[in-house]
Amino acid sequence: AGLTALDERIAGCRRCPRLVAWREEVARTKRAGFADRDYWGRPVPGFGPADARLLIVGLAPAAHGGNRTGRMFTGDRSGDVLYAALHEVGLASQAGAVSVDDGLELYGVRVTSPVHCAPPANRPTPEERDACRPWLVSELELLRPTLRAVVVLGAFGWQATLPVLDAAGWSVPRPRPVFGHGARVTLGGGLRLFGCFHVSQRNTFTGRLTPAMLRDVLRDAAGAAGL
Ligand code: SF4
């Protein structure tokens, strides 16, 4: 079974009781505010082609972004920043992402997260991170034939993703590389890993992460991936 089948299985996952309750509660109580659309309220699978050469790993879907629209970084400000940058460096067909049927296409890039359900306060527990890990392992195994580079947005994603990459056979140097914006590591097997501050509103509103900083990382990672 390929990525599409994996995505369908992820969308039906109910492994984490707290997150199942939260995502459904948000969908139930907030749906009224978005009356023109169906509220997804389920796990959000990765988005992008099955033969991606570059993978972007975030943290988890936002309550009213991915959890509402059913697509990664779609319908929230973090996504506006991310997809605008991807579009500017030639990796996305358009700058905006508002809904699953907005026509957005990614070129050689897939976007995913180590936790697929929106958590309260954007903070998954270590148990939830670990419970969701097998989905990322499966996704990486399916991407393995084409994957050349990974951009991790933020320290949570970095810490969640390194052990998975290591277990999947792209050996991570010891001591484990520390997260930072601009961190670059070449893993066993030649996979190139890039650290970038998360595109959260907290980072982008304060200028900790500027659009130019994000574009620079994406451009370098795309180059490393042969895109
Ligand atoms: Fe399943 Fe992951 Fe959602 Fe937990 S966070 S319910 S493991 S999809």
Image (spheres, rainbow, N blue to C red):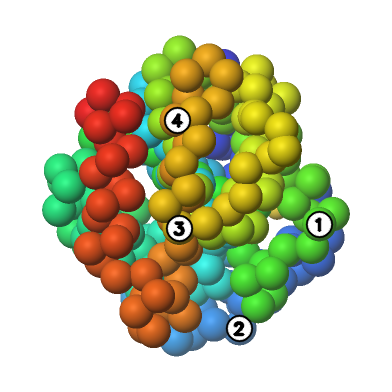
Question: Relative to the observer, which residue lies in front, 123 or 165?
Answer: 165
What amino acid is found at the position of numbered circle 3 in the picture? His
Relative placement, left or right, of 188 versus 210 is right
Query: How far apart in space, not on screen, are marks 3 and 4 (Cα)?
Result: 15 Å
Report the number of numbered marks.
4
Could you tell me the amino acid type at mark 1?
Pro
Q: Which residue is mark 3?
A: 181
Q: Which residue is mark 4?
A: 192
- Marks 3/2: CA distance? 37 Å
- When asked about the image quadrant of residue 148, the answer is top left
Q: CA distance from mark 3 to mark 1?
A: 23 Å
Q: Which residue is mark 2?
A: 29
Marks 4 and 2, the one that precedes in the sequence: 2
Name the residue: 65% across, 23% down. Answer: 171
Q: Which residue is mark 1?
A: 126
N-terminal label among 3 and 1: 1
- How far apart marks 4 and 2 lie (CA) works out to 42 Å
Give the amino acid type for the residue marked by disc 2 in the picture.
Answer: Thr
Residue 112 picture location, percent across and down: 50, 45
- Residue 14: % across, % down: 76, 50
Label 1 to label 2, Cα distance in Å?
A: 27 Å
Q: Is residue 9 visible?
A: no
Which residue corresponds to the image point at 69% horizontal and 40% vertical from the top-left? 176
Along the horizontal axis of the image, is 77 left or right of 123? left
- Of the two numbered discs 1 and 2 on the same chain, state the one appearing first in sequence: 2
Crowding at dot 1, Cα within 10 Å, few <14 / some 14-19 / many 20+, comes out as: few
